[in-house]
Image: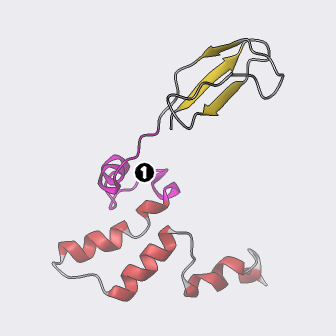
Amino acid sequence: MPIYEFICQDCQRKISFLVRSLSTTFTAKCSYCGSANLSRTISSFAYHKSLKTVWEGSGNPEHPGEDYYKDPRNIGRWVEKKFQDMGQELPPQIKEEIQAAREGVMPEPLKDFQSASPTAAYD
């Protein structure tokens, strides 16, 4: 089932058409302005990086750059590296906490920290 993309020459919007079969004929019409004055365009495509490629591009966890932790996949990399350097297996509970943090779940001990008011330390 191919998806064809067109640019409307009248309103300049991009329109996508899902065609259920190659043998199906269809009339392309702009869904915004109704014009049939369309020109076919090249579709964009997605490129997915592996976790290894992301980490290689992020740099060394011992010397993170300014944007290092903006990518949640980097959370816990320093801990994982230290355990690996010592030749030890990361405990399952820590693995679970790191994975949860990468998925956006704040570890239980830090939840109170996050909800505390910024001035609570000075009260």
Quadrant, the C terminus: bottom right
Residue occupying the point 42% across, 61% down: 74
| Residue 56 percent across, percent down from the top left | 30, 50
Q: Which region shows up in magenta?
A: 46-71
| Residue 71 percent across, percent down from the top left | 49, 56
> What colour scheme does the image use?
secondary structure
Q: Nearer the viewer, residue 88 or 45?
A: 45
Image position of 106 (left or right of 102): right
- Does the segment drawn in magenta span residue 62? yes
Q: Identify the residue under disc 1.
A: 65
Image position of 39 (left or right of 117): left
Residue occupying the point 48% across, 50% down: 66
Q: Nearer the viewer, residue 15 or 69?
A: 15
Image position of 41 (left or right of 51): right
Q: Is residue 106 above or below residue 15?
A: below
Residue occupying the point 78% across, 29% down: 31
| Residue 38 percent across, percent down from the top left | 69, 14
Mark 1, other Cα within 10 Å: few <14 / some 14–19 / many ≥20 = few
Quadrant in which residue 64 is drawn: bottom left
Name the element at disc 1. Answer: loop
Quadrant in which residue 107 is drawn: bottom right
* Total numbered labels: 1
Quadrant in which residue 12 is drawn: top right
Image position of 1 (left or right of 51): right
